[in-house]
Every structure is written in structure tokens, then in C-alpha cells.
């Protein structure tokens, strides 16, 4: 395992094919969750994979706009309380707070 928790194969083949291997792992995890009640699969895992591999989403001027307009709301639907946990972690680890308004509530209006 390397520092990103990738195995030898993912390290050797690079990030592009490593992302495909991650998607395969997610699909196998979803299959196992359908077959066994002890396994769990959260939509937020698939959502995180999709946002990490979305073309042009990590550009300096694109990501903040995507986060504010869409991704925070979708993340909140996929994992309720995600925004609150992110705010708490930001305050505890970095002693930072938001300077922009809170993102849109997926169910209407601002929070």
C-alpha cells in the first residue's frame, strides 16, 4: 500500500486506470451489499468518486462555483449532515469559517 491506500497494481498503472479500478471496487461493494446484509454501500461513496473524476471540475474558477451551486446540495442529499460535519471539521482542524453565504438548501431556499 502507498500513502493513498492504493495497492501495487494501482500504483504501477497510474491514476487514470487506478480510477477505473476504484470504480470497479465500488461496483463490487454495491453487489456485495445487495447479497449480504452485513455489507453496506452508501451513495455518497459513488458521488465522491464521480466528483473526483469529473473533467474540468477541479479548475480554480470552476470548483467553488460547482460547490456553491450544486455539489454541496447533492452531497447533503446523499449524506444528511455532511455540510455541518464539514463546517465543524474546518473549524476544529484549521480554525477557519466561511466568508461566503451558506450554499442553497436542496429542498428550498437558504439554510
Image (tube, rainbow, N blue to C red):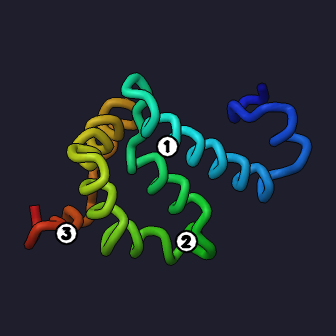
Q: Residue at x 49, y 43 (%)?
A: 30
Could you classify mark 1 by the number of other residues whose Cα lies within 10 Å: few (under 14), some (14-19), or many (20 or more)? some
Q: In this view, does 11 lie above or below 98?
A: above
Residue 69: quadrant of the picture: bottom left
User: What residue is shown with label 3?
Assistant: 104
Q: Is residue 76 left or right of residue 60?
A: left
Q: Nearer the viewer, mark 2 or mark 1?
A: 1
Q: Is 81 left or right of 5, judged from the image as shown?
A: left
Dividing the image into 4 quarters, which one contains the N terminus? top right
Question: Going by the picture, which residue comes out furthest to the right?
Answer: 12
Q: How crowded is mark 3: few (under 14 residues within 10 Å), some or many (20 or more)?
A: some
Q: What is the secondary structure assignment of the residue under circle 2? A: loop
Which residue is label 1 attached to? 30
Q: Residue at x 27, y 60 (%)?
A: 99
Q: In which quarter of the image is residue 3?
A: top right
Residue found at the far top of this picture: 38
Label 2 packing within 10 angstroms: few (<14), some (14-19), many (20+): some
x and y percentages locating residue 59 in the rendered image: 59, 72
Q: Earlier in the sequence, mark 1 or mark 3?
A: 1
Query: How far separated are the C-alphas under marks 2 and 3?
Result: 19 Å
Is residue 13 shown above or below 74? above
Of discs 1 and 3, which sits in the foreground? Answer: 1
Quarter of the figure that contains the C terminus: bottom left
Amino acid at each position: 500500500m502507498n500513502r493513498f491506500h492504493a495497492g501495487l497494481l494501482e500504483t504501477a498503472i497510474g491514476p487514470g486506470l487506478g480510477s477505473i479500478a476504484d470504480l470497479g471496487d465500488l461496483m463490487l461493494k454495491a453487489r456485495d451489499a445487495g447479497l449480504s446484509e452485513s455489507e453496506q454501500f452508501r451513495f455518497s461513496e459513488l458521488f465522491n468518486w464521480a466528483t473526483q473524476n469529473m473533467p474540468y471540475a477541479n479548475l480554480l474558477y470552476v470548483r467553488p462555483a460547482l460547490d456553491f451551486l450544486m455539489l454541496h446540495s447533492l452531497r447533503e442529499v446523499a449524506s444528511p449532515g455532511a455540510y455541518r460535519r464539514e463546517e465543524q471539521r474546518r473549524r476544529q482542524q484549521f480554525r477557519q469559517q466561511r466568508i461566503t453565504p451558506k450554499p442553497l438548501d436542496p429542498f428550498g431556499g437558504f439554510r
